[in-house]
Image (cartoon, rainbow, N blue to C red):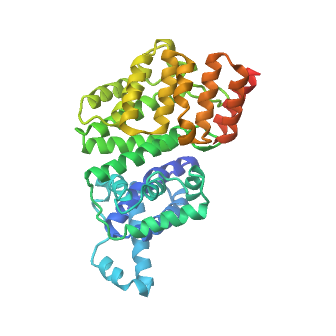
Amino acid sequence: MRTCTTSEPDDQLEDLLRELTPQVLGAVVRWSGDFAAAEDAVQEALLAAATAWPRDGRPDKPKAWLIQTASRRFVDEVRQEQARRRREERAMLREVPRGEVEEYDDTLRLLFLCCHPALTPASAIALTLRAVGGLTTAEIATAYLVPEATMAQRISRAKQKLKGASFELDADPDRLRNVLHVLYLMFNEGYTSSSGPELRRGDLSAEAIRLTRAVHAQLPADGQVTGLLALMLLTDARRAARTGVSGELVPLADQNRALWDRDYITEGVALAIEAFGTPPLGEYQIQAAIAALHDEVDRAEDTDWPQILALYGLLEDLSGNPMVKLNRAIAAAMVDGPDAGLKLLEPLDAELADHYRLAATRGHLYEMRGDRAAAAEYFRTAARGTTSLPERDYLMTKAASLN
């Protein structure tokens, strides 16, 4: 295989390897049928690339190089371990994939495999974030507030359950529901990181959009798939306006809408209209319609809050999600005043307990009501509850401004 002679900066090499990792892992899993061993082989191939490419130059076909290297490492491991004699015999009957490796992107199949019905939702999400999203086990553990060892065991058990599982695209409704839920959570974690110093992880949200586009290309007539893609595009369209010059969080009402991505908005609105007209109506279609109502107006004060309130009512009836109830309370406050919103928040004390978003919402509504002292106290309470540093700083700044 011919290689180029020029080297590339470390950050470019790191970005390339991150982009190729799920594609290479998917190819080796498809070929070998062993998720855990394939992941080990791919990690060795990535280490080999990180050493060889800066020295010898990047291959003309880096994905093929990685697949070939990982496949050979896999075979070497099979040969070396006598306890794996059966798998060695099975693996030796197959040729290491050559000519076709550049024609296939197995990331989508890997995604469906990670969302196998044999896995619990928590395990499927963790495995997808690890194998497809590229997060480390430590990052996933931090995001879900569990010890790293616990998350490592969860991922390891998930991989063992998938040994020998079918590596095909499966549009079964339950499997598809799992896939969309995982993509939704992956996007949300990328768009608003649950912990750490940065508000967002653009690589993760971009990968969620890429994978959702791939699912949509396979299932263009599915309203939920179309709705989820529309929701992601309409939400991500605001990314450039979400932070100020110092990285501080800028709430939706205060954003400079001239910075919003108009191409994403145009595409997202068209998809949202298409999705909303495709029965049966589901959660992603309704959320996309709400996002479209926010994005279509040039000024926050022109937002169609009555229509948004009606959609949140429909969404609440459909999902029963307490976070939907919280958002409905905000919409109610914008239509009927802060007291109406505060009234709707009362039942959430049992459902959301000490969740910081409930305290933050009360802070905003009490600020609307003119009760500065109560608003400041709720903002401080919310700041103590979040693990996101940009959100904490925003909430503390709000509390200080009200004092």
Direction from residue 398 to residue 68 in the image, left or right: left
Direction from residue 254 to residue 269 in the image, left or right: left
Residue 120, horizontal then vertical, whole percent: 42, 59
Give whichever of 252, 63 is nearer the camera: 252
User: How many numbered circles are shown?
Assistant: 0
Quarter of the image where one finds residue 228: top left
Q: Residue at x 54, y 16 (%)?
A: 337
Q: Residue at x 30, y 64 (%)?
A: 98
Residue 180, horizontal then vertical, whole percent: 36, 45
Residue 342, horizontal then vertical, whole percent: 57, 25
Q: Is residue 23 above or below residue 33?
A: above
Give whichever of 193, 382 is nearer the camera: 382
Quarter of the image where one finds residue 380: top right
Residue 241 appears in the rendering:
no
Direction from residue 217 to residue 139 in the image, left or right: right
Q: Is residue 178 above or below residue 35?
A: above
